[in-house]
Image (cartoon, coloured by chain):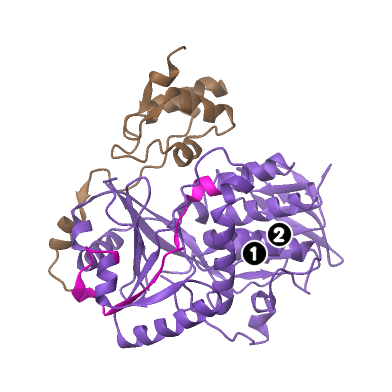
Chain colours: A purple, B brown
């Protein structure tokens, strides 16, 4: 029988980062299980943006420290390929007086935490992205150190580094049962085998709720389809990600030359659908052409969908639980697990190894929901 | 084959036979993995040119019949359509 110190469910960037951080500290007898192919879940379907402009303090802190890691990730993880990290900023458009007021507050918070964002008037914003429709927004905020990162390459960097340290990864292997006896995890049963362990990390992205259900831990998260499209690659014409919460759009030209853009569907059902719809294409194109008519010249190449794992306050759950010792959760990222992955890995490794956490994690604990202790709600989500 | 690096398998993204064989040897033995790491099938033709060539490479490497190698997921749109053509076709306001 195979025995592991710890099993991670989900080999997306969160699982890979947790595995790497633990292995680096000496816990190498780890198995990472994934039911699909490499980066088949939310990580490989995400919008490839990395930003620090958030409305809640904890999200700002997670994002800022993650960004610092990304800036030297290639060297730290000794990745032979290019992770396509670029810091050409996020320009977030305000389109209503309420948004303008909220963004001013956000920038004050971000600046307090060392995030170099600023409020821009219309003229300043048009200097940063000249092809914006001046009638589509009133003001904006900009942070130069936000930007882009290739999700496949960044995940592979963590994956290879973890593997190099001795971590095992099994793809196409689905967790079917987590056996608990007398309040202790005994083994994990998959569609292929049984593995003995007393510790399990739930990093299952869109399927985090189902993994919680396997051990009777009720995690208040759900999966929701968010659609996205990519255009043909063209000469460089836009540095920053352009984003608007009120217009429901994010749109960035990636280093490869293509534009990636997405929006959320306010009527999306809570399920595991990751399909593509005509309605998305219809609404996306109209919003895009309204905000950046010039980008409307480009041809669409492909569209796809992916699961956001939504938490009630749109902030992650990085947590253990009194309900079951040895069961850990890294889920509920609400669409932003990719960009928080370095801190997810670091904080989860500290929690699992009983080390002093690098930052106060109390507001990320799952108990915040049942004790009604949630104090902040993240509004800056598309 | 000596000229693997001169043989372009994915014309949209300029991916050579050598690159594909290297990645397969690293353990990425399905089309979806190769697509994500090499961009094969991500260009305008959406894998219509390279799809069956890569399928054959995988079949040879894995020693299985080609029909057992899963083809990649086809996604809309299969033809390039300018966004404004879609937007202008509608009469509603945003």
Q: Position of residue A102 (x, y in %)?
A: 41, 85
Write down the quadrant of residue A340 in the picture. Answer: bottom right
Q: Is residue B91 magenta?
A: no
Residue that appears at 50% across and 77% down: A110
Residue that appears at 14% across and 65% down: B90
A125 sits left or right of A5 in the view: left
Question: How far, Cα to Cα, is label 1 from label 2?
Answer: 7 Å
Magenta residues (range) = A128-154
* Residue A330 tag number: 1
- Quarter of the picture containing the C terminus of chain B is bottom left
Q: Nearer the viewer, residue B37 or A323?
A: B37
Q: Position of residue A107 (x, y in %)?
A: 45, 79
Mark 1 and mark 2 on one chain: yes
Query: Measured along the vertical axis of the image, is residue A67 above or below residue A368?
Result: above
One can see residue A29 in this view: yes
One can see residue A332 in this view: no
Residue at image mark 2 = A201
Residue that appears at 58% across and 41% down: A79
The reply to whether the C-beta atoms of the residues labelled 1 and 2 are less than 8 Å apart is yes
Q: Nearer the viewer, residue B33 or A279?
A: B33
Residue that appears at 78% across and 47% down: A28
Query: Measured along the vertical axis of the image, is residue A247 above or below residue B51?
Result: below
């Amino acid at each position: 029988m195979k025995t592991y110190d710890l099993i991670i469910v989900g080999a997306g960037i969160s699982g890979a980062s947790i595995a790497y951080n633990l292995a680096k500290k000496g816990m190498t007898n780890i198995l990472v299980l994934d039911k699909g192919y490499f980066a088949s879940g939310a990580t490989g379907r995400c919008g490839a943006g990395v930003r620090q402009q958030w409305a809640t303090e904890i999200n700002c802190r997670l994002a800022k420290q993650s960004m610092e890691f990304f800036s030297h990730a290639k060297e730290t993880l000794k990745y032979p390929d290019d992770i396509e990290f670029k810091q050409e900023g996020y320009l977030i458009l305000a389109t209503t007086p309420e948004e303008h007021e909220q963004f001013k507050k956000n920038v004050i918070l971000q600046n307090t935490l060392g995030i170099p964002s600023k409020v821009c008037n219309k003229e300043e914003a048009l200097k940063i992205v000249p092809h914006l429709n001046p009638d589509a927004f009133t003001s904006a905020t900009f942070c130069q150190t936000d930007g882009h990162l290739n999700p496949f390459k960044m995940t592979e960097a963590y994956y290879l580094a973890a593997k190099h340290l001795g971590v095992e990864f099994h793809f196409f292997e689905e967790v079917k049962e987590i056996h608990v006896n007398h309040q202790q995890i005994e083994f994990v049963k998959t569609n292929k085998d049984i593995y003995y362990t007393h510790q399990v990390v739930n990093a299952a992205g869109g399927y985090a709720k189902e993994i919680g259900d396997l051990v009777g831990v009720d995690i208040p998260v759900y999966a929701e389809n968010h659609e996205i499209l990519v255009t043909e690659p063209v000469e460089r014409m836009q540095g920053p990600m352009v984003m608007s919460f009120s217009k429901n759009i994010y749109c960035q030209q990636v280093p490869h030359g293509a534009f990636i853009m997405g929006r959320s569907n306010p009527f999306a059902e809570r399920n595991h659908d990751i399909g593509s719809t005509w309605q998305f294409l219809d609404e996306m194109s109209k919003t895009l052409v309204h905000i950046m008519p010039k980008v409307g010249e480009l041809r669409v190449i492909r569209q796809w969908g992916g699961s956001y794992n939504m938490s009630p306050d749109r902030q992650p759950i990085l947590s253990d639980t009194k309900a079951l010792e040895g069961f850990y959760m890294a889920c509920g990222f609400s669409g932003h697990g990719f960009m928080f992955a370095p801190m997810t890995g670091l904080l989860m490794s500290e929690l699992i190894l009983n080390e002093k956490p690098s930052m106060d994690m109390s507001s990320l604990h799952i108990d915040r929901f049942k004790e009604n202790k949630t104090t902040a709600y993240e509004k800056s989500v598309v | 084959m000596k000229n693997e690096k001169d043989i372009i398998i994915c014309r949209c993204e300029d991916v050579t036979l050598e690159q594909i064989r290297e990645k397969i040897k690293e353990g990425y033995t399905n089309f979806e993995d190769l697509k994500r790491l090499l961009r094969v099938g991500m260009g305008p033709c959406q894998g219509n040119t390279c799809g069956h060539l890569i399928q054959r490479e995988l079949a040879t490497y894995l020693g299985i019949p080609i029909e057992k190698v899963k083809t990649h997921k086809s996604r809309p749109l299969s033809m390039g359509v300018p966004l404004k053509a879609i937007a202008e076709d509608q009469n509603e306001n945003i």
